[in-house]
Amino acid sequence: MSTKTERKIIKVPDGETCDYIDGKFRKDTPEEYVRQTIEKRLVNEHKYKPEHIKIEFGLKLGSSRPRADIVIFPKDVPELTQDHVWLIVECKNEKVEPKHKNNGVEQLKSYMSACPNCEWGMWTNGKYKEVIRKVKIEGKYTYQEYNDIPPADGSLEDIDRPKRNKLKKAFDDNLLLVFKTCHNHVYATDGLQKQPAFFELLKVIFCKTLDEQNVGKALNFYTTSAERSNPDGQLTVRKRISEIFESVKKTIPANF
């Protein structure tokens, strides 16, 4: 006796998209594109379970009732309420800057403050990404910058010092999002035109590729959150990546 697997075909209305997590139809906007890309990354790369993720989750913030774009709850919480939110992600379109008065990183911080057990937050507009961790020091909460949010197992070590056996595969548009973020960072920070910025990005890609191919040795293409936030740490990172780039120049016949 054979069984047939029934397939259901869902027609997505024009101008809308089907949400990756909850399957609801939402308007296909630039901001929604960013959110869908992040949702896929949360599940496929960071290994969060869809049942632990809620979209447009309502919050109580004083007299207002905003909706957080994405929230994640820990495993085995008794109920999915504001008190149990562990991580919040806010997604914006490219025109919204991180320092925007109402829709920037400060908005994310206000949402995190309203959730007593929220430890992590990420703000992104597809071009830039800001990750913050809420920690309590001497009775007061403060926000510390990190390279990325932790994976589902909560390992902080994996954020700063990657291991070869835990390298993540890129899925769908996530690789494009990473390339775009890197390119825009080079373009904006170094003041380069788009073409020179592209070639600088190629150098970064070559360094990353060669480092991953150097099987048997620890990965050296990384920066810790602490290194990124201070001048001495930045010099350490520059020295480490420069050594990789010297190997790239010997390996790849190109005019760098």
Image (cartoon, rainbow, N blue to C red):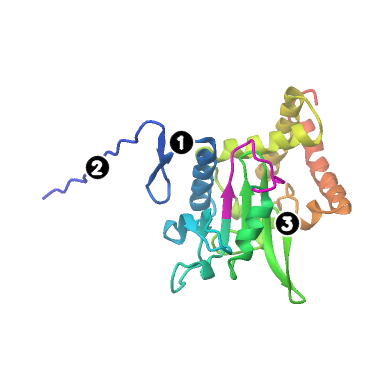
What element does badge 2 sit on? loop
- The image shows residue 83 at horizontal and vertical percentages of 53, 70
The correct choice, above or below, for 222 with respect to 158 in the image is above
Task: Please tell me which residue lies in front, 18 or 221.
Answer: 18
Q: Which residue is mark 3?
A: 145
- The image shows residue 218 at horizontal and vertical percentages of 71, 53
Question: Which residue is located at x 62 percent, y 62 percent?
Answer: 112
Residue stretch rendered in magenta on the structure: 89-102
What element does badge 3 sit on? strand
Amino acid residing under circle 2: Arg
- Furthest-front residue in this view: 63
Q: Which residue is mark 1?
A: 28
Question: Which residue is located at x 53 percent, y 65 percent?
Answer: 85
Label 2 to label 1: alpha-carbon separation: 25 Å
Total marks in image? 3
Q: Quadrant of residue 64?
A: bottom right
Res 149 visible: no
Label 3 to label 2: alpha-carbon separation: 45 Å
Q: Which residue is mark 2?
A: 7
Amino acid residing under circle 1: Asp
Horizontally, residue 245 falls left or right of residue 46, namely right
Horizontally, residue 252 falls left or right of residue 41, namely right
Question: Earlier along the polypeptide chain: callout 3 or callout 2?
Answer: 2
